[in-house]
Image (tube, helix red, strand yellow):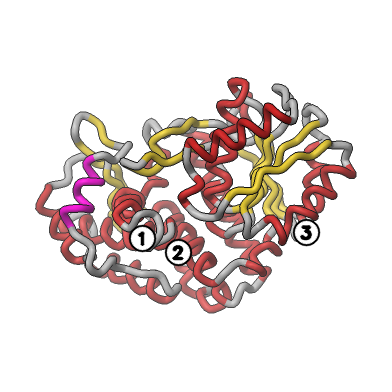
């Protein structure tokens, strides 16, 4: 078992990375000051695989367990689905010490976290991520949200989990497309913070795609360390944490234009990172060779670089509603090299439009 501590003073918590970790969630939760009732939020894909193991673990630790199962996909990140979680919590008599547990990927984590942040003005929240994307990124750091028809993650809160339990063996059942989606977020960490890690990923590409358990565990741990370091310095994304949005500005627009069904989040981020690299090159802050190196690794991991047939104008309309916008300008994360990025609002429309034209 490996542990990563997220140091946030009163909101600090531990990430436990352990094979078979789902069967130990109940025992780990008993170390915390929690009530005896717990609500699991999962989806229809994950439920038959891991809900039984988690329920048994909680029951053995003395918890009374209720469950909400939602449909998989971005469509469940909605106020309507959140209301179904609230209804179950109220019906089961959950109080302010009753934990809500996310068992699933990023959609389930965001939904359950939003429910935990708002039910009774905040109840304990436990993350048990089962996808690579959630294990390396969305389960850590306390971003919770649901989508609006006009944009992604526009309704939400910063709300830290009390505990994160990552079980790498859950990736054995992950569909190939979802594994690759998670690798997009993994690559992001190398670009924004660790040139050596990026090089290690390039060397280990085949092992990662083959789901080598030792390599996966090492990569997950390093990603959690990098994110914990950033979140500890900037919990609410006022400055440094914005670096984690590399690729997400255009990525979210790609997801939205596709109705959250054509490209998943990791694929959108991959396309968005490619676009960010092109913008960086167009603005003269990054070498052409570094953009090519990023493109090559994304391609080796089987990730898309373009959204063929998409309208640059449609993408631009979503960019103009980006939640990272200030005073009419987007806070762009641009790469200055592999392992180095910067935040700037001084990006020309021509550089953006040229990049969008190249990815569509």
Where in the figure is residue 100, as x and y percent of width and height? 68, 36
Q: Nearer the viewer, residue 188 or 57?
A: 57
Q: Is residue 315 magenta?
A: yes
Q: Name the N-terminal-most of marks 3 and 2.
A: 3
Q: Residue at x 17, y 46 (%)?
A: 347
Q: Which residues are magenta?
A: 312-320
Q: Are marks 2 and 1 in contact (CB under 8 Å)?
A: yes
Q: Is residue 304 left or right of residue 288?
A: right
Q: Name the N-terminal-most of marks 3 and 1.
A: 3
- Residue 338's label in the rendered image is 1
- CA separation, marks 3 and 1? 35 Å
From where the camera sits, is residue 281 visible?
no
Q: Nearer the viewer, residue 71 or 304?
A: 71
Helix, strand or loop for disc 3 = loop
Q: Is residue 60 left or right of residue 166?
A: right
- Residue 198's label in the rendered image is 2
Residue highlighted by disc 3: 20
Q: Name the N-terminal-most of marks 2 and 1.
A: 2
Quarter of the image that includes the C terminus? bottom left
């Amino acid at each position: 078992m490996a542990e990563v501590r997220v140091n946030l003073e009163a909101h600090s918590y531990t990430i436990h990375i352990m094979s078979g970790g789902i069967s130990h969630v109940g025992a780990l939760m008993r170390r915390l000051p929690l009530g005896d009732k717990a609500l699991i939020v999962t989806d229809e894909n994950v439920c038959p695989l891991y809900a039984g193991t988690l329920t048994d673990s909680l029951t053995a630790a003395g918890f009374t367990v209720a469950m909400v199962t939602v449909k998989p996909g971005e469509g469940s990140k909605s106020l309507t689905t959140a209301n179904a979680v609230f209804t179950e919590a109220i019906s089961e008599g959950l109080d302010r010490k009753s934990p809500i547990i996310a068992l699933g990927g990023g959609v389930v984590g965001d939904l359950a976290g939003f429910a935990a942040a708002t039910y009774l003005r905040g109840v304990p929240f436990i993350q048990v991520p089962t996808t690579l994307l959630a294990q390396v990124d969305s389960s850590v750091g306390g971003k919770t949200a649901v989508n609006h028809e006009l944009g992604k993650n526009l309704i939400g809160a910063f709300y830290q989990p009390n505990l994160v339990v990552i079980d790498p063996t859950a990736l054995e059942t992950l569909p190939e497309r979802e594994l690759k989606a998670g690798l997009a977020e993994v690559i992001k960490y190398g670009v924004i913070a660790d040139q050596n890690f990026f090089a290690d990923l390039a060397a280990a590409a085949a092992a990662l795609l083959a789901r080598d358990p030792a390599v996966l565990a090492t990569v997950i741990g390093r990603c959690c360390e990098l994110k914990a370091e950033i979140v500890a310095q900037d919990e609410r994304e006022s400055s440094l944490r914005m670096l984690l949005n590399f690729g997400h500005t255009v990525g979210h627009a790609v997801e939205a234009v596709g109705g959250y069904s054509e490209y998943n989040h990791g694929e959108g981020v991959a396309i968005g990172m490619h676009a960010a690299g092109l913008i960086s090159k167009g603005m003269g802050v990054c070498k052409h060779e570094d953009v090519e190196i990023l493109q090559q690794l994304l391609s080796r991991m089987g990730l898309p670089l373009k959204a063929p047939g998409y309208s640059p104008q449609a993408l631009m309309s979503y960019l103009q509603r980006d939640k990272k916008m200030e005073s009419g300008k987007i806070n762009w994360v641009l790469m200055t090299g592999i392992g180095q990025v910067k935040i700037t609002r001084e990006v020309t429309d021509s550089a953006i439009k040229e990049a969008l034209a190249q990815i569509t």
